Amino acid sequence: MPHLALYTFGALKAPLADPAPLTRELHESGEAIYPEISQQPGYLGHAEPTDRDGGAHFDLDWGAWGEFVVPTWYDKGRTVETVALAATLSLWTDLRSAFDAIYTGLHREALNRRYDWFERAAHPNYVFWWVSDGVIPTWEDGVSRLQHLDDHGSTPHAFTFRESFAPEGTPTRVQGVGPKSDQVR
């Protein structure tokens, strides 16, 4: 059975190493969100470095998730002192599970504050795609799919909640997501 891959990316207003209160709040929220998300039905796993003491995102060993890369439009730092990004790569059983996890609980609270921490972007900040059972998506896959979404809009190759696709490539909807005229009530 195929699994749903999700890549998220955002450029931060300040480097992760910045000691300002807003940066600390972002760190603290992330530390609480991951354990909550990992308990959600449909969650299968997310990219984690094999050794957290290895440096910045770009220097870490991500194991089967591959080398850490970012979209071409990211133009900020790449060292421990200057990196200013947040990115995730995860696997889910289905769209409904991912939607419920993302738009409830602590993650929902963090989304409500995203513009405190993240720059507003002209590019998409997340993308979904289907992978075969047993396949672990890589950071490179996520960046490639996000850039495809940016260039072509939602397609079976790279899509969003609002314009999503089933594993076989047919358009599908998550109840309660999409234009109001299309929402199932």
Image (spheres, grey):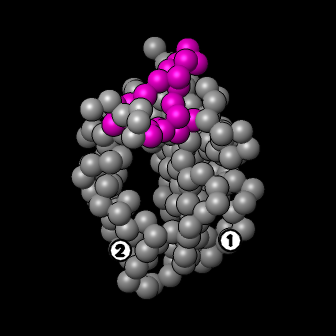
164 in magenta: yes
Residue 165 locus on image (x, y percent): 53, 25
* Residue located beneath label 2 in the image: 25
Tell me which amino acid carries mark 1: Lys
- Badge 1 marks a residue whose secondary structure is loop
Residue at figure coordinates x 50%, y 82% from the top left: 18
Drawn side of residue 68 relative to residue 94, left or right? right
Judge whether 84 appears above or below 34 on screen.
below
Q: Which residues are magenta?
A: 159-179
Q: Residue furthest front?
A: 181
Tell me which amino acid carries mark 2: Glu
94 in magenta: no
- Closest to the observer, 107 or 160: 160
Residue at figure coordinates x 56%, y 31% from the top left: 129
* Residue located beneath label 1 in the image: 76
Q: Point out the tag, 2 or 1, that comes first from the N-terminus.
A: 2
Drawn side of residue 177 relative to residue 68, left or right? left
- Badge 2 marks a residue whose secondary structure is helix
Residue 81 locus on image (x, y percent): 60, 77
Determine crowd level at label 2: few under 14, some 14-19, many 20+ residues with C-alpha closer than 10 A: some
